[in-house]
Image (cartoon, grey):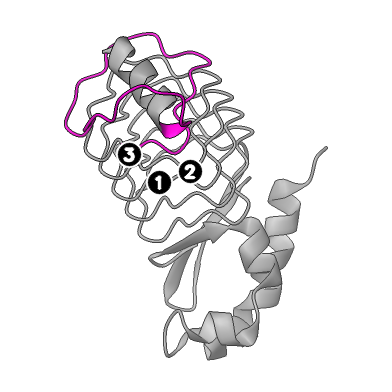
């Protein structure tokens, strides 16, 4: 299987090689430091693969089984992880900037030190995800869970930087009641986000 990946990598780079359909493949192997950038792995089974420090920039990992996979220090910038299963995955120090994690399963995933700037986390399942400090609040009709990198308000989960900089029009798009609610509670939520993310 690693030979197929190497051939596909060469094909993507225009250095010969061969195009392969890697979807629905099973990859139980050592892929540390491997260059998977731009590859289409939609629906593949990567459960058990070692992806530490792998290059996955812009890769299509939608609906991929990454449960329990070690992705520590991996570069997932701009990767498509919609609907991916990341249950119990180790994402410590991973670069998830601009990655799409919509509807991804991140139950018990370790996101300590991960870069989630501009990442999309809408409808992602972050139950018991590890991310440093945490604060839960319940007031005004929506439950709020603030972590070191991201905050969930109701069913909307976004990186903290998004909540801190969100415009009125962006808040209004979330729900027809959201802007009025944010006008009352937004200042307090942003204050707690700053406390949770403070480096002490």
Q: Give the mark nearer the N terminus: 1 vs 2.
A: 2
At x 69% / y 49%, what residue is drawn?
196
| Residue at position x 26%, y 18% in the image | 27
Element carrying mark 3: loop
* Label 3, residues with CA under 10 Å away: few <14, some 14-19, many ≥20: some
**Is 36 one of the magenta-colored residues?**
yes
- 74 is higher (above) or lower (below) than 150: above
Per the image, the residue denoted by label 1 is 126
Per the rendered image, the range of residues in magenta is 12-40
Q: Could you tell me which residue is drawn at 35 percent across and 59 percent down?
A: 123
- Label 3: which residue? 40
For the residues marked 1 and 3, what is the alpha-carbon distance in whole angstroms?
Answer: 25 Å
Majority secondary structure in the magenta region: loop
Look at the numbered disc 2 and give the secondary structure of its residue.
loop
For image coordinates 63% across by 51% down, the residue present is 117
Q: Nearer the viewer, mark 1 or mark 3?
A: 3
Q: Nearer the viewer, residue 90 or 128?
A: 90
Residue at image mark 2: 58
């Amino acid at each position: 299987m690693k030979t197929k990946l190497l051939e596909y990598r060469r094909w993507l780079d225009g250095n010969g090689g061969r195009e392969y359909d890697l979807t629905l493949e099973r990859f139980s192997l050592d892929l540390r430091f491997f260059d998977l950038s731009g590859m289409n792995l939609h629906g593949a089974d990567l459960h058990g693969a070692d992806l530490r420090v792998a290059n996955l920039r812009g890769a299509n990992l939608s609906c991929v089984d990454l449960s329990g996979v070690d992705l520590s220090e991996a570069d997932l910038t701009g990767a498509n992880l919609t609907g991916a299963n990341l249950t119990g995955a180790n994402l410590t120090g991973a670069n998830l900037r601009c990655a799409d994690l919509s509807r991804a399963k991140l139950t018990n995933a370790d996101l300590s030190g991960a870069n989630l700037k501009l990442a999309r986390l809408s409808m992602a399942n972050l139950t018991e995800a590890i991310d440093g400090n945490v604060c839960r609040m319940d007031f005004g009709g929506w439950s709020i869970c603030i972590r070191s990198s991201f905050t969930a308000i109701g069913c909307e989960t976004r990186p903290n930087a998004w909540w801190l900089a969100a415009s009125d029009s962006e808040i209004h798009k979330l729900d027809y009641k959201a802007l009025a609610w944010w006008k009352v509670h937004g200042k307090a939520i942003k204050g707690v986000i700053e406390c949770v993310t403070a480096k002490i």
